[in-house]
Amino acid sequence: MPTKKKKKDRKRNKPELDLELDDDNHTQETQSITSDDDSAEMLNLLARYECLYLNPQYSDLTIICGTEVFPVHRNIVCPRSSYFARSCGGNFKEALGTIELKDQDPNLIRKVLQFLYTGDYTFEIDGDEEKEDNLGQPSSQDHSRGFNACQFHVRMYAQADYFQIDGLKSRAERYFRGSFLDQPSKDPFEAIITEIYTSIPESDEQIRDAAIELTMDNLETLRNGTEVILLDGFLKRSPAFAADLCIAMLKRRSESQKEEIFRPAASKPLFTLYGGH
């Protein structure tokens, strides 16, 4: 397909970049990117910047995380992340060209940057890179490694919240929903819920609401499957999750009863209404 051919050409010409990052038109184009990471306009624009991902050419900002050093470009990362925009705009060390991220996972930072440059992120299992779109159908080999893809997406959501990247939050939630019960067993499920309720601020209800909704939609599997996944003991150890689940179930039940009350009764034949037999 033409798009694939274009991508190959881009990789082949990577050493001969001819991009003016300080050009006014470039800045205006970059700032026009919105949080709608599925828009064709944004994807076309990001395709021009993909070759700059982790590329030191034209880099004017360095991110240090642990032992990892990432070369980045302000005109790409700042318009899409309020965190980086604020850091580079103030009278701080970051404004001089260096951002040091302490207490952060370099692997997750790499994925955050990948999203900022490409509009998507990938994951690696034992060195093999896979697109996140394939997470909905993991192989048995993935299960044997104990890789919890769903929990990984929760962590990416937390990164999106920290760095204030709305598009990444939407993408991570989408992948989270698609991989929620990839590993239908007790330990992965409890790890996912615990991750959400410990790493995501309580004020951010988006991912919590998604977890509660998915839990209610899959109660039959979680409670009555071959293995009981959602145990009473876990609910007692996770009062915030248990309370949210209880409230959501009551609300759903109440709405269901209202629908039954206001549902029109089946019409009866006219002869019945007038005493006919």
Image: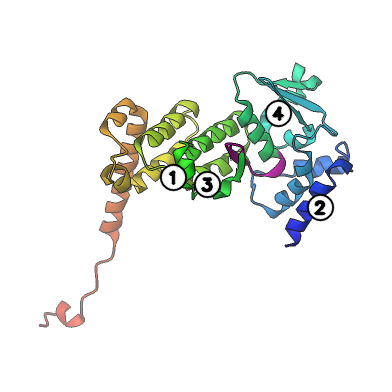
In the picture, the disc for residue 135 is 3
In the picture, the disc for residue 9 is 2
Label 1, on which residue?
A: 182
Is residue 123 shown in magenta?
yes
Q: Return the residue nearer the eye: 10 or 88.
A: 10
Quadrant of res 119: top right
CA gap, disc 1 to disc 4? 34 Å
Mark 1 neighbour density, 10 Å: few (under 14) some (14–19) many (20 or more): some
Give the color scheme: rainbow, by chain, secondary structure or one colour.
rainbow
- Which amino acid type is shown beneath numbered disc 1? Asp
Query: Which of the marked residues, 1 or 4, is nearer the chain's N terminus?
Result: 4
- Which amino acid type is shown beneath numbered disc 4? Phe
CA gap, disc 2 to disc 4? 31 Å
Q: Which residues are magenta?
A: 117-127
Can residue 26 be seen here? The reply is: yes
Q: Badges 3 and 1: C-beta atoms under 8 Å apart?
A: yes
Query: Which of the marked residues, 3 or 2, is nearer the chain's N terminus?
Result: 2
